[in-house]
Amino acid sequence: MGCRAGLVLDSCGCCSECGNLEGQPCDLDSTNSFYGLCGSDLQCKIDISDLGLGEVPEPQCMCKFQEAVCGSDGRTYMNICQFKESAYSTAGLSVQGSGPCRTVPLIKVPPHNLVNVTGSRVAFLCEVFAFPMALIEWRKDGNDVILPGDDPHISVQSRGGPLKYELSSWLQIEGLALGDAGTYRCVAHNALGSVSASAVLGVLGPDEMNAFLSENMTEMFGYDQPRDYDEDYY
């Protein structure tokens, strides 16, 4: 497939080999030759920011330039290194300009259908990418009010991320009542347009929830668990 990150000299400095891609492990200097060296516009660094408890840091190739670029395919690349990877296998791909592509919002993570029992709590998540930055609103079908409105058991929280030019928003409903059932819609809009995604919330009473869970367990495992536990296999 060729070298998507370009060629680099090997450990002896006499031959060329493929450079490692962004995110791949690498050798910090030429004294080691286990993982190999990073490719064009990449540098080998140790990032301890994402380490979990007890994890050992491992050097990885990171792009030297972290400014986003807009490709001629209308796609935003988070840095020039990611663009070069795609350009290697896409004929005619070029940089249209620095910074992200101007685009209507794109819902990267839509809200998912939920079912829960009365009195409990649920939360819908909606993650959006857009430039210019988008505004996210929540609505319930059949109601023109932008949530939460004046409803004390509904709240909305939004923050930037998880990635650059993204926005995450949560709709949380406390103390579910049967009247909360319905279709909820995440609406994202900026100066270039709007987009939406919806999810259905089902609210059941305790007896209905027990029956719902029993039915779904039977479908998942192919048998009635409580009955099988009563049988004597010996």
Image: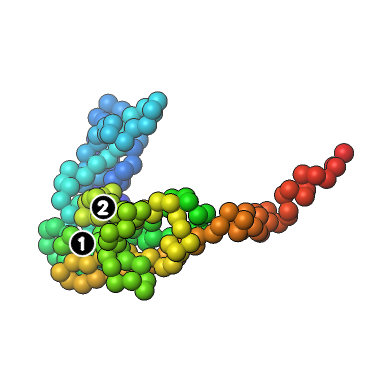
Q: Quadrant of residue 143?
A: bottom left
Q: Residue at x 27, y 34 (%)?
A: 49
Amino acid of disc 1:
Ala
Nearer to the camera, 50 or 232:
232
Q: Is residue 7 above or below residue 222?
A: above
Q: Residue at x 28, y 68 (%)?
A: 145
Q: How was this image coloured?
A: rainbow
* Element under disc 2: strand
Q: Quadrant of residue 129?
A: bottom left
Residue 133 visible to the viewer:
yes
Q: Quadrant of the N terminus?
A: bottom left
Amino acid of disc 2:
Ser
Toward the right, the furthest residue is: 234
Instruction: Residue 105 in the image: state x and y as whole percent.
Output: 24, 65
What residue is shown with label 2? 158
Toward the left, the furthest residue is: 98
Q: Which mark is residue 234?
A: none
Nearer to the camera, 45 or 149:
149
What residue is shown with label 1? 134
How many C-alpha atoms fall within 10 Å of the one at disc 1: few (<14), some, or many (≥20)?
A: many
Q: Residue at x 78, y 48 (%)?
A: 228
**Left or right of 215 in this view: 31:** left
Instruction: Residue 209 in the image: state x and y as whole percent.
Output: 58, 56
**Left or right of 209 in this view: 144:** left
Residue 81 visible to the viewer:
no
